[in-house]
Image (cartoon, rainbow, N blue to C red):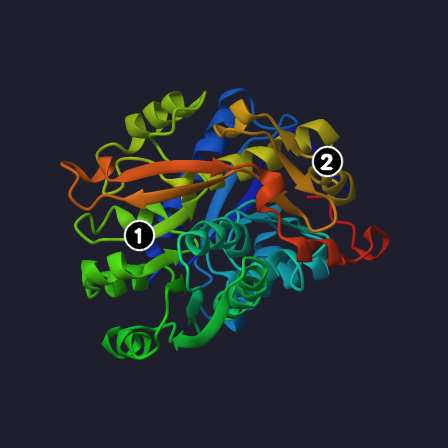
Amino acid sequence: MAAPPGVPLVIAHVAPTTGRFALHAEADRRGADMAIEEFNARGGVLGREIVLVSRDPTLDARRAAQVAEELITQTRVGFMVGAISSSVAASMSAVCQKHGVIFINTNSSAPSESVENAHRTKFVFDAHGANFNRALLKFALAQRKSKRVLLLTEDNDAGHSNAAAMRAYIAEYGGTVVGQVLSPENLPDPAEVLKQVAAVPADVVSLVISGDNQIKLFAQIDPQVLERQSWIVGEVDWEELYPAPGTPRPLFGTTWAWNLDTPGTAEFVARYRQRYGHTRLDYPGDVTHAAYLATRALLQAIERAGTTDNHVVIGQLENHQATARERMQHAPAFMDAQSHHLQQSIYIARWNPRAERPERGIEILGHIPPEQARYEQERTTRLEPLADTPRYIP
């Protein structure tokens, strides 16, 4: 039975608040907070105030599953948003599917999230490595007569699933994979990894390195190496750039930047800075942007449904569409009803380490519309039937 009007609607924000994704978790929570503030300012959703509770699932998949179970059975949350780590998202969303709780994956970059680890109750709002690398590899390989590609990936779900996706694109664009170097998730010193990379003759080095590991890695790379070879990294979040402004970076992909000349961007940045302009992340990045819009899409779906009944809200989310203005991007975005992955604009960017101020360092070189960045494997995704998904009405 649904809760009566006036009873708060509890949403759990789940993201690792310690370790290499701590800054990402804070940025993600800010985005969710901003969306919830908007709705509460006009009376909440369906006459109910929205309350956000935060839990740290850690980076341990088994612990994350326990946290999800506790949030559902003890805290009685209505919905979950967050993730950051793809392995955490996979673990927690499996528990949510068991109970019928809708899980909004705001930010994680493993293609497996919308293929083998997809669920009827999970919706993925971030672009993933396959989207970014499809655009970046085509660009990088077109610049090279010899097309030898070395993969440098983390030894985790995100690394392996991105590598599998990249191999298909490398072959499509006439390249050859000449090796793969695996980096540990816990990367205390990247010297050994870089030594292995240097031992393999390659024209393009394609990376899947995330969180604070990116800062450690690029701090030790000679900028001349980046000039001799085409280094690309599928996604670089603002939270990996801003804390290390003097560190050189290769070409990378992103979904949004604070200095995009798109409708709505300036207003969103001003609103963010009014609240957070005195903090370490005094400008918003792609993580905050994604979490804000994902949480907003969830609340809008509940409004359109006129109920918190998960079966009805799922139907609304499967039909989610957003204009370019609503997305603050160059093209409309839409939810793929088969994979539950939002198809959106992808931006090719670079980082100027010599910018006079850190926020000026990000430079957008171009954008790719959703249709050109689409991951073809998502056409094979098989979700649980809605009829087999437990009904959940918070």
Image coords of residue 345 (percent x, y): 53, 37
Secondary structure beneath dot 1 equals helix
In the visual, does 84 lie left or right of 317? Answer: left
Q: In this view, does 114 lie above or below 3?
A: below
In the visual, does 123 lie left or right of 330? Answer: right
Which mark, residue 292? none
Image coords of residue 196 (percent x, y): 31, 79
* Crowd tier of the residue under label 1, counting other residues whose Cα lies within 10 Å: few below 14, some 14–19, many 20 or above: many
**Residue plotted at (17% across, 39% down):** 355
**Residue plotted at (15% across, 43% down):** 354
- Verify CB contact (< 8 Å) between mark 1 and mark 2: no
**Residue type, label 1:** Glu
Tell which of 248 and 148 is nearer to you: 148
Tell which of 341 and 299 is nearer to you: 341
Image coords of residue 378 (percent x, y): 68, 54
Pointer 1: what residue?
240
Look at the image and tell me in which quarter the N terminus lies. top right
Look at the image and tell me in which quarter the C terminus lies. top right
In the visual, does 217 lie left or right of 211? Answer: left
Secondary structure beneath dot 2 equals loop
Q: Give the total number of marks visible in the rendering.
A: 2
